[in-house]
Image: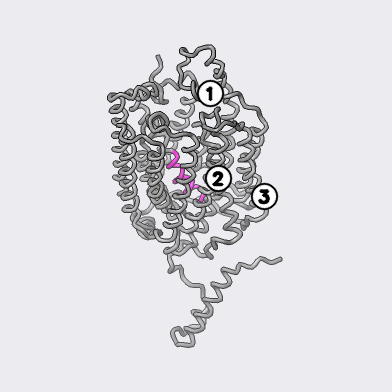
């Protein structure tokens, strides 16, 4: 059966009707002018019909990002698994430059999800070692202080049995990131067809789908992994293999949707030069904004007494708020000034966050509902900051390099976290903020924790300096692309920085999991003696 693009047909009929009325009124004279294709005066970057958000092709894209949201939860339980995000530039180049049977996107999507599906299936049928501690009441007890009765709740061999699951999880992560890079390229291609005033709608929609998937995953984690083995308040335990089986389901669905629903036309294209130096601000602003403190998790669990189930369900509510603000920005904020939006959102986040944190540190109010509830307001502002910061990626990408450019820009976000983490862990290692210190809860410890937050907030505020590298809106960024020219030295310099940070991040991840190196200050330890 012949597939008819009704949206494009309606648009063309409307154009012909308008042209006929213009000819009757004498507004145009040439017969050609009546029916010629309109110029791209609506601000679209390439010709073509924008993707209708509720079309089958649109739903096939949402399915991709829903599954990425699911995979994200299973992929973040160990640092090493996140390494795949650093290679998004190379995966993007693969989908741009290495077509399979004439197709640049669909085969790589299938390959990526198949890898993830196989790894999750293997882990779903593997047996897991007993947990390190099965009784939350004694889990914080020092090993040398354990009585024989308490020691029976511990499995001291548990940390040594996780290597195979780390490796499988890392491979699964690489798989869905490959699929994600190809999907990102498709989104960029369709976004280029959107007129200037609505460009960003599709981007917003796919991120909403992603966070819906992440919300579902957090619900599963919050309910099923809140047993005694995970220091939770529920009386039952669910094996991690069951979670792997549940996360396997969306992989199977998305493979089916990709084969049956997702459509792509054959193309032949070569690689064009990547004018990526304009994205330098992305790395700088996110390195500064990702600066945090190692005391964040301990004060949440030990001082605010936030239970795992509360933490998980607050994540669900946070994602719902986040998705709501994405919808709002997608409808009302596509043409907001990027600089002012990011700056005001960042300042508001710091004001809310600092109030809650310092009330908790100095025992003004230590309550899990206050701690979690007040910080949910951050999600509204974080949603604005996040989605506005991603709109420039579409503007920078050029036809033929959609996957490489989008992968490169989003990889810079992934790089920023480990770089900032190494720096703040190194700084925090000189403060007395270990779990043992925080359990003392004396005035000296409180000020030690406060100092680390002063430093973190200072770096976050300093991140706004780099907004001068970001054009205020889409039109200004397009003007910069047209008038700024191409400087190969900028591109080469940025590529060298990318490779250096890639090596640094990979090394950092490896240091964090090996016994002989995780004691190093650069890996977050207190120093090897």
Query: What element does badge 1 sit on?
Result: loop
Q: Secondary structure at mark 3?
A: helix
Name the residue carrying label 1: 135
Q: Mark 2 or 3, which is nearer the eye?
A: 2
Query: 318 or 52, which is in the foreground?
Result: 318
Along the line of sight, the residue nearer the viewer: 492 or 342:
342
CA–CA distance in space, label 3 to label 1: 42 Å
> Mark 2: which secondary structure?
helix
Magenta span includes 435: no
Q: Are marks 2 and 3 in contact (CB under 8 Å)?
A: no
Q: CA distance from mark 2 to mark 3?
A: 20 Å
Principal SS element in the magenta part?
helix
In the rendered image, residue 480, in percent from the top left (x then y), is placed at 35, 56
Near-viewer residue (502 or 357): 357
What residue is disc 3 on? 256
Residues 476 and 308: in front is: 308
Quadrant (top left, top right, bottom left, bottom right) of the N terminus: bottom right
What residue span does the magenta drawing correspond to?
399-414
Nearer-N-terminus badge (3/1): 1
The residue at which mark 2 appears reads as: 216
Q: Going by the image, does 102 lie left or right of 69?
A: right
Q: Earlier in the sequence, mark 1 or mark 2?
A: 1
């Amino acid at each position: 059966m012949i597939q008819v693009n009704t949206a494009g047909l309606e648009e063309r009929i409307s154009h012909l009707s308008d042209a006929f009325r213009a000819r009757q009124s004498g507004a145009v004279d040439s017969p050609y002018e009546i029916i010629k294709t309109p110029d791209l005066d609506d601000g679209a970057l390439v010709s073509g019909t924008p993707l209708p958000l509720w079309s089958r092709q649109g739903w096939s894209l949402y399915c991709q990002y829903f599954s990425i949201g699911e995979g994200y939860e299973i992929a973040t339980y160990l640092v090493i698994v996140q390494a795949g995000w650093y290679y998004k530039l190379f995966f993007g180049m693969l989908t741009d430059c290495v077509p399979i049977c004439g197709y640049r996107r669909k085969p790589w999507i299938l390959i990526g999800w198949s890898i993830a599906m196989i790894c999750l299936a293997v882990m779903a049928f593997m047996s897991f070692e007993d947990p390190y501690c099965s009784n939350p009441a004694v889990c914080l007890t020092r090993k040398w202080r354990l009585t024989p009765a308490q020691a029976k709740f511990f499995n001291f061999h548990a940390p040594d049995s996780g290597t195979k699951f780390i490796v499988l999880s890392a491979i699964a992560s690489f798989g869905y990131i490959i699929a994600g890079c190809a999907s990102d390229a498709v989104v960029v291609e369709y976004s280029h067809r959107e007129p200037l005033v609505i460009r960003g709608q599709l981007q917003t929609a796919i991120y909403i789908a992603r966070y819906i998937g992440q919300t579902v995953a957090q619900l599963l984690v919050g309910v099923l992994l809140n047993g005694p083995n995970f220091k939770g308040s529920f009386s039952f335990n669910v094996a991690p293999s069951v979670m792997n089986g549940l996360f396997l389901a969306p992989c199977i669905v998305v493979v089916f949707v990709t084969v049956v629903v997702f459509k792509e036309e054959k193309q032949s294209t070569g690689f064009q030069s990547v004018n990526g130096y304009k994205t330098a601000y992305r790395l700088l602003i996110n390195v500064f904004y990702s600066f945090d403190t190692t005391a964040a998790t301990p004060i949440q669990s030990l001082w605010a007494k936030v239970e795992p189930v509360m933490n998980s369900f607050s994540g669900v509510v946070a994602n719902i708020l986040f998705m709501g603000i994405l919808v709002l920005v997608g409808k009302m904020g596509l043409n907001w000034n990027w600089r002012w939006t990011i700056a005001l959102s960042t300042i508001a986040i710091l004001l809310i966050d600092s109030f809650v944190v310092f009330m908790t540190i100095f025992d003004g109010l230590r309550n899990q509902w206050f701690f979690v509830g007040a910080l949910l307001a951050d999600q509204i502002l974080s949603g604005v900051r996040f989605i506005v910061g991603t709109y420039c990626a579409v503007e920078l990408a050029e036809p033929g390099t959609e996957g490489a450019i989008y992968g490169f820009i989003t990889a810079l976000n992934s790089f920023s976290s480990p770089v900032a983490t190494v720096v703040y862990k190194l700084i925090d290692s000189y403060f007395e903020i270990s779990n043992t210190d925080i359990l003392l809860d004396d005035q000296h410890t409180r000020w030690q924790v406060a100092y680390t937050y002063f430093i973190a907030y200072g770096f976050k505020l300093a991140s706004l300096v780099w907004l001068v590298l970001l054009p205020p809106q889409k039109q200004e960024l397009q003007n910069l692309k047209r008038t700024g020219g191409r400087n190969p030295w900028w591109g080469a310099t940025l590529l060298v920085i990318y490779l250096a940070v890639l090596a640094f991040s990979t090394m950092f991840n490896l240091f964090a999991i090996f016994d002989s190196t995780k004691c190093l200050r650069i890996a977050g330890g207190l120093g090897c003696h």
